[in-house]
Amino acid sequence: MAGHKIEESIQKTKQGFEESFAAETLYNRQTQDETHLNRILNFLKIDKKVNILDLGTGTGYLAFPIAEKYPQAEVTGLDIVEKALCRNRQRAEQENLKNLHFVSYDGMKFPFADQAFDWVVSRYALHHFPAIEETFREISRVLKPGGRFFLSDPAPNEDDAERFVDAYMQLKKDGHIRFYTRGEWQALADAAGLTLCDGFTSSIRFPKKRETAPGWEDLLKRFDGGVVKGYRVEVTADEIWITEQVNNLLFQKEAPRG
């Protein structure tokens, strides 16, 4: 993607999420899942005294519980949406979480030194990143040798070769790029020196306001009905619901040889 297109995508994502965070009730319904959150926290098995980066932290959905569970760890939430980060900082101060910090950036280059973190985690964010190969290089750069990277992100169904799900998600102009298969994530990680070592699958039942999905009826005409049905689509008076599978994958940075 050309440089100006990348910048345009980042700004679109920033604006879209500022609007989503303002509509707090719907955003929480879209993203919050206590069962999934607890499964992630139990899966990570983080050592106590480590540095953790929450990439695309948003409202701090992962950052806050990780900081609470591991008070000896240093947790940094990174995002492009300054309004959300300001609210997060206020909340962290109110909850006396001195090990939790929030940093803004330009959506491309991470503002951290090489090998600054033991962990990078990211949930429901990476499908918005317009230069995903560069993002993986940045993740690898800031990880220490032997460090770990955990991602959780929705995936296309196996029969969705034409990517109905991406076209659907792009109806809302919030910078959605694409969902990736497990194999695609693994290829990106391999190129960045990250090795897949564990993972699990889950699912999310995702609501969208019909007013944010202009062209929905035309979209249905473009894609095979069986593919659409596979996402368990349900349309109500003012919302559209679909079910998306989620990849939850753990990678480790390779240690240098010799």
Image: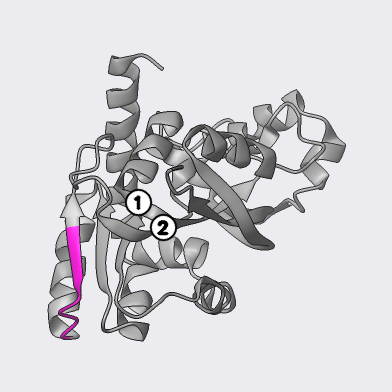
- Which of 249/258 is in front? 258
Residue 128 is situated, as x and y percent measured from the top left of the image, at 43, 39
Q: Is residue 186 magenta?
A: no
Residue 20 sits above or below residue 6 on the image: below
Disc on res. 147: 2
Q: Amino acid at mark 2?
A: Gly
Magenta region, residue range: 96-102
Q: Categorize mark 2 by other alpha carbons within 10 Å: few (<14), some (14-19), many (20+).
A: many
For image coordinates 84% across by 36% down, the residue present is 225
Residue under pointer 1: 143
Judge from the rendering whether residue 226 lies leftward or rightward of residue 220; answer left or right.
Answer: right
Q: Which mark is residue 35?
A: none
- Asked if residue 73 is positioned above or below residue 192 in the image, the reply reads below
User: Is residue 122 visible from the viewing direction of this image?
Assistant: no
Task: Estimate the spatial distance between the alpha carbons at disc 1 and disc 2, rounded to whole Å.
Answer: 5 Å
Question: Can residue 3 be spotted in the picture?
Answer: yes
Residue 161: give x, y in percent of width and height: 76, 29
For the image shown, how many numbered marks are present on the structure?
2
